Image (cartoon, rainbow, N blue to C red):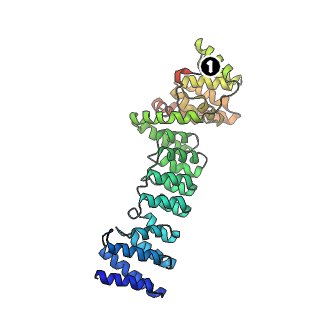
Amino acid sequence: MSETTRLQDLVALAHETSSVRRRELLRRITETFLAYEPASASTEMERFDDVLCVLSDQMEEEVRGELARRFALADMAPAGLARRLARDEIAVAGPILSNSKLLSEDDLLDVVRTRGQDHLRVVSGRDGLTEAVSDVIVERGDDDTLGVLIRNETAAFSRWASEAVVDRAVGNPDLHEAVVSRRSLPVDLLNQMYFVVEQRLRDRILTRNAEVDPVVLEAALMAGRTRVAAQDGALPADYAGAEAEVSRAARLKRLDPATLAGYLRAGKRTQFLIALSRLSEVEYAILSRIVDASDLDALAIVCKAADLDRAGFMTFAVLLGDDRRETNRAQVYGQVYAELPRETALRTLRFWRIRREGDAVAA
């Protein structure tokens, strides 16, 4: 078909009032375009684009949807038409938004900044999303949209987006699996999920920790220290006095499991946490969260890394419990404790540690 014939068809389409005839002409022109594929910068492409952009508002949704499906599979399409279809109803926009070839980053940013969750979810599943697009989706997306984005390993995340995703996921169990399974999530952020996920996901985190390259590990720890420090919050009112008491025990070389158990028996929770913090080099606030949650799994990792014996760990576990059930739990975890490799505990603990600069809170 010559260029003259193609242009004549465009003119005919522009003046056609019958929806049936317009549909036939549209299909004919589209098929001809896809077979011929004029150069994107050609006059013919510009005319094709201009006419279809004008007509697209007059076409039924079903016709626009068919147009979108056809061009979504093409290597090239009229740029203006592609952008218009991408902003259409989701039944029309879906095929265009799913395709990785037709829309630029600016096009996608326009869609995710202005359209609703259906559009955001489709964009979230695209291959090769840039950090800029992912940032907007994380900011505007609901939890369902966020789940699609997190599962898309080809989507690039900025550090801000990764932190925001973890913050959202901490309070939403529906996102736990997706976040822990994301291979590109920074390992320091992955380990923040340890405290809120179920056991099978904790096991995945421990496995990933064991695989981390030491260079990557150090970089992750550096990135995480500032974030964790900023989230610690205020210390308890009795902290200063408790710190002085623990410091005296340390000077007398009495900072051992028996002393820590004595603190618990005497109801000196702050002293216990400060002492365990010294032995394990894990920040007070993190240990406080573990104890408040009666998280014996995490407590086992802390004690193992601090090289405390099994008897000491079991004593802490029982004393931290409120009823007889804690004794049974402690016995179960005692077996887990015996089987937990210290190297695994040490590697995991590094993500929970923040060394105090200059031992600022020591007496």
Residue furthest top in the image: 252
Residue 42, compared with residue 353, is above or below; it is: below
Q: Inspect this view and state whether residue 294 appears.
A: yes
Count of marks placed on residues: 1
Residue 344, compared with residue 266, is above or below; it is: below
**Residue 126 lies in what quarter of the image?**
bottom left
Count residues near mark 1 (Cα–Cα under 10 Å), then give few for <14, some for 14-19, many for 20+. few
* x and y, in percent, of residue 72 in the image: 40, 69
Q: What residue sits right under mark 1 in the picture? A: 258
Q: Residue at x 53, y 54 (%)?
A: 146
Asked whether 284 or 88 is in front, the reply is 88
For the N terminus, give its image quadrant: bottom left
Asked whether 148 or 344 is in front, the reply is 148
As drawn, is 134 to the left or to the right of 76?
right
* x and y, in percent, of residue 200 in the image: 53, 45
For the C terminus, give its image quadrant: top right
* x and y, in percent, of residue 229 in the image: 56, 32
Residue furthest left in the image: 2
Q: Residue at x 57, y 36 (%)?
A: 297
Residue 97, compared with residue 178, is above or below; it is: below
Query: Regarding mark 1 in the picture, which secondary structure is present there?
Result: helix
Asked whether 94 or 299 is in front, the reply is 94
Residue 70, compared with residue 173, is above or below; it is: below
Identity, as a three-letter code, of the amino acid under mark 1: Ala
* x and y, in percent, of residue 334 in the image: 57, 32
Q: Inspect this view and state whether residue 332 appears.
A: no
